[in-house]
Each structure stands twice: as C-alpha cells, then as structure tokens.
Amino acid sequence: MQHQLAAILADASTGAPVIATRPEFETFKARIVGPNGTLTAAMKGMATVPKEDKPAAGKLLNQTKGEIEKLFAAALARIEQNENAARLGAPIDPTLPSPDDFAGSLHPLTQVREEIVSVFHKLGFTVADGPEIESEWYCFDALNTPANHPARDMQDTLFMPDATRCADASKRGTEAYLLRSHTSSVQIRTMLKQQPPVRIIAPGRCFRRDTVDATHSANFHQIEGLWVDKHVTLRDLKSVLDAFVREMFGADAKIRLRPSFFPFTEPSFEMDLKSPDLGRLSDRWLEIMGCGLVDPKVFENVGYDPEQWTGLAFGLGLERIAMLLHGIDDIRHFYTNDLRFLRQFA
Ligand code: PHE
C-alpha cells in the first residue's frame, strides 16, 4: 500500500506541471480519481489491508489524497491563467494608465462663470454670495418691487409651501420665503453688511416658474453686479459693460443700451451686444442683460444716504452667455449630463 501510494503521488507530481489544457487536465484527473483511477483503486484496496495496519494506511491515503488535490488545484489555476492571457492577447501590466484617460473637467457653465468672474475681477469687482432660499423682503421689498409686481405672483415665482422657514422668529408666519427669482437679492445683503464703496459681482442659481424649452429653464444662473461709490454715472455703467463685452466677445464687440424698466434701477436699460466673432449671429443685436443706475429708494432701504451715494447695477444670464459663446442651441444640454456634450468643453 505504501509503495502503491508513493507511486501514485510520484506520477501525479510529474504529470501535473506539464498539463496545458482543460481536456488534458480532465484525462489526467480521471486517470487518478476516476472510477478506474489509480487512487480509486488504492482506496478500494483498503478493504484487504490487515486490521492492525488500517489506521496507518488510512492516514497515508488521506495525506496522499490531500497532496493530489493540491496538485489538481495548482494545475487548474495555471490553465485558467493561460486562458485569460490568451484571451487578452498579452500579459496584463497593471501599472499602465486606464485606456479611458478622461479625467473629468469643469462644466461649461462653471468655465464661463469663472471667465466672467475673472473679467470683472480685473475691473475691481470681488465675489459676493447669498442664499438660494430668500425672503420676500430681500428679493422684492428692499428692491423697491411693489406688492402687485408680476414677479411676486405665484404664477411666476416658486414660493415655499409655508412661511415657517423664516429665520427671524419674530417674523415667522408673516413673511413668505421663495426660491430667489434673481440674484439682485445679493445687492441688498451686501449693502446691509458693508458700507460703501461697494464693488461686487454675485454669481448664483435662480429659479422661476418657467416651462422648460430650448431657451427656458425653471432653474438657471445669473451674475449680478453692483458698484456703489460717489459720482457713479451712466458713463461708468457703459464703460464697465463695454470692457466686459470686449473681453468676452472680442475686441470689436459693441454694446447698445435700450431704455427699459426695473423697480430697483432708475434709469433702467436692456443691454444688447453685437460681435463679428459670433458667427451666424454676428449681424444681430443680442439682448444679454438688464442694468441701470441704482434707484435712491434702494439706498434708503439699506440705510445708505441717497444724497451721498450713487451706484450702478446689472444682472446677466450665465446660460445665455455660454450659449452665445459656444453656439449652443438648447439650454437643456447644460443639465442632462450627456458626456458627448460635456467632453467638448474638456
Ligand atoms: N434682476 C434683473 C432680472 O433678473 C436684472 C437686473 C439686475 C436689472 C440688476 C437691473 C439691475 O431680470
């Protein structure tokens, strides 16, 4: 028995390392542990071993079986490895970079926002911020927007379901909260926080009850601008906007101010732009922002002396600028996270 088992193990040890394929492995395995296998025969032979030798023989048999199972497992692992290597064509080098080397990039709206911020930075503006959930006072009252103004209508603006979110406990239940409909609320927050001179821009998300289509989104972005100092005039407004437009849309870009109305500026304008660098849009005036000189009423609301201080303000739509710059024809592309779109700005 001892010799028989030693011979089986020797046979398995020499045979296993040279097996290369699965069929070879199956034949090899059958030769040892199959119904007519050598080890199977040895196990059957246990019956004829004298009783006093049985424990030792049994122990040896189990040991041999264990060794042979290890040989099987090693042979199988080697076969699998070969199969994988054959499938891949070459051995794997795990230190190589991923074949998809797209590391991610800033969203086009973020890129355009940063570009605009840096242009205004050069003109002396710093960035200010305000909350997206805003009280009616910051969004409308302080901005001289009367109770009957259409922006205050439920049809146009997203009001919070109840007024209990009001941070000021004394006003709780009396003041409505809404998703800010414009970034002009940041004008108020900034002026209440600091004394003039003020020169800020405030990029941020805005919300309106708009039906989504190619040019409208209920959720969009604006960049607000506010400059308060002594003797700020229309000439300053025009030169700031002129400089901005030439930096963003090319040295030959032109602006045009058209009289308009906003409750918080007087006079108020819509600003149009025309640039030979805008391809098929180059022969058209394109409306890109609202602007004007700060209404004295707004200064009164924040405790600035309107006799002493003057100011200019403007608000532009970030999506609109990005769409013009990149020739994007549908605002929805910005929000669907389609990599085919996003990677064009990487
Ligand atoms: N808040 C205005 C809007 O959303 C834009 C604006 C800002 C107009 C500042 C004048 C001054 O339409």
Image (cartoon, grey):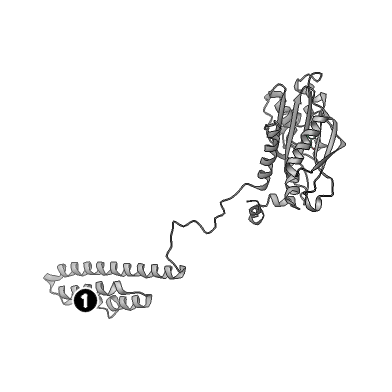
Asked whether 230 or 131 is in front, the reply is 230
Considering only vertical position in the picture, is 246 above or below 88?
Answer: above
Considering only vertical position in the picture, is 102 above or below 178?
Answer: below
Q: Residues within 10 Å of mark 1 (few under 14, many from 20)?
A: some
Q: Which residue is farthest front?
A: 251
Image quarter of residue 144: top right
Which residue is denoted by mark 1 in the rendering? 42
Considering only vertical position in the picture, is 94 above or below 116?
Answer: below
Image coordinates of residue 164 in percent, x first then y, are 69, 31
Q: Is residue 299 visible?
A: yes
User: Is 144 placed left or right of 10 in the picture?
Assistant: right
Q: Is residue 218 visible?
A: no
Quarter of the picture containing the N terminus is bottom left
Task: Residue at 22% x, 72% y: name it.
Answer: 9
Task: Residue at 32% x, 70% y: name it.
Answer: 75
Task: Residue at 75% x, 25% y: name it.
Answer: 228
Asked whether 228 or 153 is in front, the reply is 228
Image quarter of residue 231: top right
User: Is 83 placed left or right of 55 in the picture?
Assistant: right
Image coordinates of residue 168 in percent, x first then y, are 68, 25
Image quarter of residue 146: top right
User: Is 3 placed left or right of 15 in the picture?
Assistant: left
Image coordinates of residue 76 in percent, x first then y, are 35, 69
**Circle 1 — which element?**
helix
- Taking the image in four quarters, ligand 1 sits in the one at top right
User: Is 337 placed left or right of 176 in the picture?
Assistant: left
Asked whether 249 or 140 is in front, the reply is 249
